Image (tube, rainbow, N blue to C red):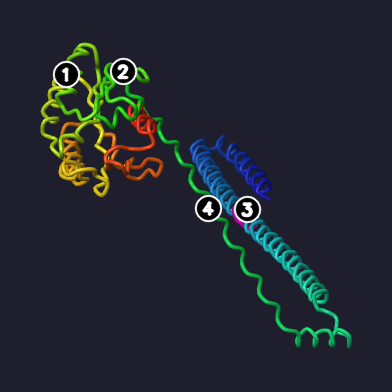
Amino acid sequence: MKKKLLVIIMAATLVLAGCGAKKSLDNPDAAAGAEISATTESTAVSEADTKSEVKEAANSAKDQKSETDVATAKSTEATAEQTKADKDASTSAASSEQNKAKEAASASSEKTKAEDTPPAPSASAETTQADQASAPAPEPTPAPEPAPEPEPALEPAPAPQTVDYGRIVYTGDSRSVDMFNGGVDEIWYGSYNGITVFCKDACQQDYMINAVNNVGWENFDTLVSWMGCNNYGDFGPYAEFYSYVLSQGKNLILCTVGPTLDSALANDFDKTHYTNDLQIAYNNSLWSWANANGVKVIDLYSYINSNPDIYLDPADGIHYQPQPTTVIWNVILSGLN
């Protein structure tokens, strides 16, 4: 339609231009005015057409935008409806699955209940139950006693250490003579078990000092002494000499004097000087001195007093039987190991 209007306007313009041209030949001024008027009208028509086209283009764009918005809205609405439909379908499917699971669980429960329900007891079963009810309850089985815990293994005792006493000199009185030979009254420079022995009846500390000097201080390492019975309870003279032995760097081992039997003492002198109390008094002093000086003691008094295989001679109450009293010597040897 726009094109048709434009053609009509152009045709009219041409007609008017033709007429104007004719008039211009007759009247040049009028022709010029007509040409200007035609040009002005053509420009106005052109501007009107342009405005019309712009307006139509704007309306067309507006219509296209409106159509696009409507299409977009319809698409969004369709998507929402599809999503809702999918959700409803999913929910329906889940609900259906839950209903099926519930039905299956209910059926299983009914089946289990039916299986667990015991059959009705028969008459025989009822009789058995009555008999069981009247029977005495069985005594409870006592709980087993717990097994005793194993005793901890004892650690082996450490092996006794053997002291090397080196070269040993032994001195004693008549009780020492009886250990080796009951038929003599002295053993001078005897040798028993590798030990040099000096012993004599009724001797005292001077006999011991003489024996050690004869051996020579440079020729022995340890002095073992079983003396004192003939000193009537006085340990003093021995303490002085024993201190000197230690000062010379020698080892010293002392034996307690043995018991006496007061009721068997033979004469008045013995009954005064050889009582058992005097033996005990001597030993007490010996123990005190030995402990103070770190000297080893072999307790022959306790051994003889408690050993039924050794007994005091009933003829004098001082010496021991049966002779030779080798068992006493063995005790001394054990004390050196």
Q: Secondary structure at mark 1?
A: helix
Q: Amino acid at mark 2?
A: Gly
Is the residue marked by circle 3 packed among few (<14), some (14-19), or many (20+) residues within 10 Å? few
How far apart are the two marked residues, 1 and 4, measured between alpha carbons? 64 Å
**Which residue corresponds to mark 2?**
190
Asked if residue 116 lies left or right of residue 337, the reply is: right
Chain-order first, disc 3 or disc 2: 3
- Residue where numbered disc 1 is placed: 210
**Res 97 quadrant in image:** bottom right
| In-front residue for pair 34/290 | 290
| Label 2: element kind | strand
Seen at 58% across and 40% down, the residue is 20
Mark 3 is on which residue type? Thr
Residue picked out by circle 4: 149
Q: Are marks 1 and 4 in contact (CB under 8 Å)?
A: no
SS class of the residue under badge 3? helix
Q: Earlier in the sequence, mark 1 or mark 2?
A: 2
Sequence-wise first label, 2 or 4? 4
> Given the image, on which type of amino acid does mark 4 rest?
Glu
- Range of residues picked out in magenta: 64-70
* Disc 4, SS: loop
Q: Identify which amino acid the numbered label 1 is placed on.
A: Asn
